[in-house]
Amino acid sequence: MALKARVLYDFHSENPGEISVRENELVTVFSEEELEGWLEGKNSRGRLASSPRPTWRSSGTTSPPTRPITTRPITTASPRPNPLAIPHLPLLSPREEEGEGEEWATAAAVTLGTTPPLYPVTTSLPARRSSSQQQQAKSTATVGRNLNRFSTFVKSGGEAFLLGEANALVRDGDMMCVVMGKHGPEWQEDPYPFTCTIDDPTKQTKFKGMKSYMSYGLTPSHTNVQVNRRYKHFDWLYARLVERFPVISVPHLPEKQATGRFEEDFISKRRKGLMWWMNHMTSHPVLARCDSWKLGKRKAERDELVGANFFLTINPPDVPLDLQDVESKVEGFKTFTKRMDENIIVVNTTINEFGRKQMIGFKKEYQKVGQSFKVLAQAFEMDQQAYSVGLNKAIAYTGEAYETIGEYFADQPRHDLDPISDLLDIYKGHLANYPDIIDVQKGALTKVKDCPQQESDLHERCNIISCATLAEIQHFHRTRVRDFRLQMQHHLQQQISFFQKITAKLEDALHRYDEPIL
Amino acid sequence: MALKARVLYDFHSENPGEISVRENELVTVFSEEELEGWLEGKNSRGRLASSPRPTWRSSGTTSPPTRPITTRPITTASPRPNPLAIPHLPLLSPREEEGEGEEWATAAAVTLGTTPPLYPVTTSLPARRSSSQQQQAKSTATVGRNLNRFSTFVKSGGEAFLLGEANALVRDGDMMCVVMGKHGPEWQEDPYPFTCTIDDPTKQTKFKGMKSYMSYGLTPSHTNVQVNRRYKHFDWLYARLVERFPVISVPHLPEKQATGRFEEDFISKRRKGLMWWMNHMTSHPVLARCDSWKLGKRKAERDELVGANFFLTINPPDVPLDLQDVESKVEGFKTFTKRMDENIIVVNTTINEFGRKQMIGFKKEYQKVGQSFKVLAQAFEMDQQAYSVGLNKAIAYTGEAYETIGEYFADQPRHDLDPISDLLDIYKGHLANYPDIIDVQKGALTKVKDCPQQESDLHERCNIISCATLAEIQHFHRTRVRDFRLQMQHHLQQQISFFQKITAKLEDALHRYDEPIL
C-alpha cells in the first residue's frame, strides 16, 4: 500500500541501499511494513532500498491532518527510541483520530513489549528556576555519584535530581503540591477530576480484512467525546508515563496475549483490565494531571519534565520531614507490600480455583441432581393416573431447576470472582512498582545521610523525593482501601444476588407442588 | 439367672433329657439362654436337661403381669416357629412393658435375621363361613396344585386359598373391604386412623452395664401413652405381618447393623427409618387395623387369619373385575416398579454423592476462600491507619462468614438429602415386596385361565386376590404420590432456608463495609 509522505529532516545515506532525502521532500512509501526501523520507498530520484532516519510526513492519499512517520537505521543501538510519531495521537484526544489509526499501527507495534528507554535528561533550554522552587540546580562536590549505573535510583533520574543536575523550565501550572494531611504527606487533590469510560471493543479490519484489531471506545468525562483506541496506544502511553514519573506507581496494563486476542473472554478481561488501569490513572492526582495522555497536542516543552526533572515540579510542605520517620515509614511500607504481594497470590489462586470448581464441579453436581430428579419423574410418568400427573410435572420441573442452578454456578464466577481477580491484577502491578520507588527514596536517603547539614540543597532535594514517595504511599493506601472496600462490597452483593436467584428458582419449583392431590 | 415360670400347656417327654410338665405347674428356668427352642430348668420332681415344648409362665421373681415363656424341641424342623411368647408384648401396648424387656430379650433375639416362617394354615376350629363371605371353602377337583412348593404363590397361601383350602373363623370385624374407587379397586379407609411418634432412643443397660441397647419411646395417637420398644420388637412384628398378609406390601424395617449401633448417625438414621416404617404401617388401611401389633392382648382366634386365611377377610366390590384388565394393570405396575426401582437407585446414588461432595468438597472450597480473605485481612492489618481498620475487620469478618458458609454446606445434606434417601429406602423395601405380590396374583390368574367358567368359586376367589392386589397397588401409588410430594416439598423448603441462611450471612458480612472511609 503505497503512501505519499513528506520528509521531516535531512538524511544522508552512508551505505548502499540507503538514499539521501531532504526536509519537506515528497516521497512514496511502498508499504507500512517497517523493518528494523527502515521503510521501503522511493523519492523523485529513484528507489529507496530502505528508508533513512529522518521523518517524513505523509500526504495525498491520507486525508488531513497528516501524520509523521519515523524510521530509524538498523545501526541505532538500544535503548532504541520509540517512534516519535506516536505522541501526536494522544490517548484521549479526539482530534487526530480519523483515518490515522492504520498508518501508525505498524510503527507503534515496534514499541510493544519493549522496555521504555530511560535516557539522561538533556535539554537545549537553559536551566530556569521556577519561583516556587527553592533548590539550586548545581552539582555538589561533596556527594559522589552512584557507581551502579543500573540502579533505579540512577536510571530514574533520582540521583541526577539529588545532585542538582535536573535542569528544565517549570511553570507554575506544572507544579505538583505535596500537602501535609492527617495521615502524613499527600498529593494535593486534582482540582479538575475526571473519569473515562471504556466501551466494549469492536473488531476492526484493515488491508481488506487481512489484518484485524480490537478498538475500544474511550469517553473522558471532561470532553464527553468518544475516541477509538487500540491496546498499543495504551501501551505506548504506559511507557511514556513510566519514563516520566520516577516515584509514581504507574498502573500496569493488563497482560498482552499473543493468541486468542479476539476471543470473547480475553476481550472482556482485557477491557476490565483497561478500565482498572484508566480508573487508577484518572484517580491519581499526578497522573490525571499529566497533559500528554489527555490533551492530545504535543507540548514539546513539557517533554522535558521527565525523570530527574519531574522532581522539579514537586512543591513539598513547608516543614521538611523527619528523615528517620520517613525511613521507618518507607521500611514499614516495604514490609507491607511484600506481605500483600504474597497474600494476594494466595487469594488469587484460591478464588481462581474456586471459580473453576464452580464452573465445573459445582455445576456438574447440581446438574447430576437435576438429571436424577428428571429420571425419577420419568419413572413416575409411567403412572398417568390423574393424581400422579401434577407430581410428575413438579419433579421434572425441580430437575430442570437444579440444572439451571448448575448453570447459575457456572456463570457466577465472572460476576463476583473475576472482578476480584482483576483488582488483584492491578495491585500486583503496583506492588511490582514499589521496590523501584523505594529504591529511589532509599538511594536519596543513603546519599544524604553521609552528607553534612550545610549541604542544605541536598537535604531539600532529598526531602522532595521523600515527600513524593510518602505521598505516593499514602495514595496507594487510600486507593487500596477504596478499591478493596468497593470490590468486596460488589463481590458480596453479587453473591447475595446469586443465592437469591437460586432461592427464587427453588421457590418456583416448590410452587409446582402446590396442586392438591386429586 | 433363675426364673420361676408357670407352665401353660402339658408336655410329655419322649426322649431322655426331656421332662414332662403339666399346665399351671411351677418350674424354675436356670437361664434365659434358649438352645434350639429348649430351655434348661427343673420342676418340683427334678431337673430338666432341656425344657419341653409346653409353655410356662414365669412368676415370683418377676413382678406381675407374668410373662409366658415358650420353648420348643430341637427336633422341630424348619421353618421353625417363632417363640409364641412374643405376641404377648405387642409393639404398642403399654400394659406388659415394665420389667418385661429383659426376660424375653433372648428369646426375641432368636427371631433376628430369620426368615419368617410361612407354614400351612392348620386350625383346630371347624371351618366357619362369615356371613359376608361368598366363596365356599372346598377343594376343587379340576385345578391341580402347583408343583413348585417354593413359589410365593404357594408359600404365601395364595394357592391354598384359591383351591378353597382356607378355613378359619372370620368375624365381621375382621373383614377388610375393597371398594371401587375413581381409579379402580381401593382398600376401604381405616375408620379409626391413628399415628404413632417415635422419640429419640435412649441407651439402656442391663446385667449391670454388661449389655446395652437402644430403647425408643413410641406414642400412638389413639392411646397417647408412651411405651419403650427396641429394634427387635419391630423386627419380630415385621416377621409376623409378612407371614400374615400375602398381598400386602409390609414396609421393610431400616437395615440391621452389627457395629456402630450406638453411634449418633446410625441411631438417627435408624429412628428416621423406623418413623417411615411406622408411618407406612399406620397409613395402610389393612396394616393399621391389624390388632396384633397395637392392641397388645393375645387374641388367639385372630392368629388364624394368616396366609391363605387372610383372603377370607377380604370383601370385594360387587362387580367382579375384568381379568384382562387386571392382567394389564398388574403388568403395567410390574414395569412401573422395575423402572422405579432402577431410577431410585440413580437418585439415591446421586444425592448421596452430592451430599458427600457438599460435606467435603463444597465445605473445603468455601473455607479455603474464607481463609484466603482472612489472609488478605492479615496483610492489610499491617497498615493500621484509621481509615484502614474498618476494612481490615470487614474483610476478616467476610473470611469468617465464608468459613461458616462452608459449615452450612457440610451440615445441609442431613436436612434435605438424607430425608430423600430415607424415603427411597422405604420404597426400595416396597419395590422388593411387589414381585412376590405380583407372583401371587399371577399364580391365581394362571390357574383360573385354564379353568372352566363353571368353577365360579375359583373365579370368585381369584377375583378376591385380584381386588386385594389392585387395591394394594392403588395404595402404593397414593402413598407414593403423597410421600414424594411431601418429601420434595420438604427438600425444597430446606434448600430455600439453606440459601436464605447463606444470604443472611453474606448480608451480615456486607454490612461490615458500611463504615465510611475516614
Image (spheres, coloured by chain):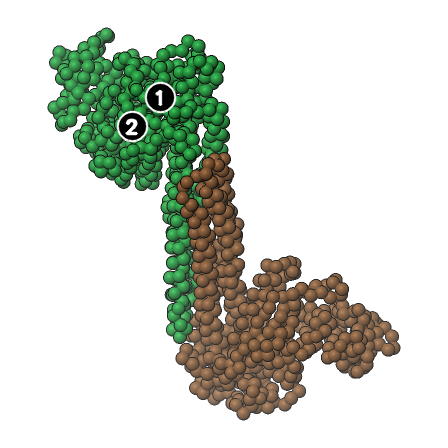
Chain colours: A brown, B green
The amino acid beneath tag 2 is: Cys
Q: Position of residue B349 (x, y in %)?
A: 46, 39
Quarter holding residue A29: bottom right
Q: Position of residue A146 (x, y in %)?
A: 56, 77
Q: In whole angstroms, how far apart are the C-alphas of marks 2 and 1? A: 14 Å
Image quadrant occupied by the C terminus of chain B: bottom left
Q: What residue sits right under mark 1 in the picture?
A: B311
What residue lies at 46% left-to-right and 75% top-to-bottom?
A474
Circle 2: element type: loop
Quarter holding residue A166: bottom right
**Chain of residue at mark 1:** B
The amino acid beneath tag 1 is: Phe
Circle 1: element type: helix
Q: Which mark is residue B447?
A: none
Q: What residue sits right under mark 2 in the picture?
A: B290
Image quadrant occupied by the N terminus of chain B: top left
Q: How many marks?
A: 2
- Left/right placement of residue B215 relative to residue B494 reads left
Q: Residue furthest front?
A: B318
